[in-house]
Image (cartoon, rainbow, N blue to C red):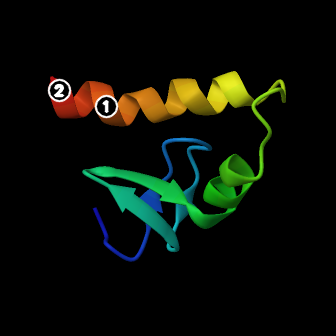
Amino acid sequence: MDRSSRRCIVCGEERAVGIAIWDQFICHPCEQEMVNTDVLDEKYPFFIKQMRQIWLKQNA
């Protein structure tokens, strides 16, 4: 995979800017949306589900 562009585990888009946690990538727009999402927001459970991919792959 080209290091200048990686697939985001949240939105699935190929992006160049974001954060890597272990072998997983979260693009900057998704990161910003996640940090600014209230726990009562209906999208919050989706973000939790996507973040679990990091922990599940790490413990596999």
Spot occupied by residue 9 in the image (x, y as percentages of width and height):
48, 42
Q: Are marks 2 and 1 in contact (CB under 8 Å)?
A: yes
Task: Decide: is 46 above or below 51.
Answer: above
Within 10 Å of disc 2 (Cα), the crowding (few <14, some 14-19, many 20+) is: few
Residue closest to the far front: 39
Task: Using residue 20 as the reference point, say whether residue 49 is left or right of it.
Answer: right
Quadrant including the N terminus = bottom left
Residue at image coords 67%, 22%: 45
Residue on which the image places disc 2: 59
Judged from the image, the secondary structure of the residue bearing numbered disc 2 is helix
Task: Decide: is 10 above or below 42.
Answer: below
Task: Decide: is 2 above or below 1.
Answer: below
Quadrant position of residue 11: top right
Spot occupied by residue 15 in the image (x, y as percentages of width and height):
54, 65
Task: Decide: is 10 above or below 45.
Answer: below
Residue at image coords 50%, 54%: 26
Task: Using residue 41 as the reference point, say whether residue 1 is left or right of it.
Answer: left
Task: Using residue 41 as the reference point, say whether residue 50 is left or right of it.
Answer: left
Residue at image coords 58%, 52%: 13
Residue on which the image places disc 1: 55
Within 10 Å of disc 1 (Cα), the crowding (few <14, some 14-19, many 20+) is: few
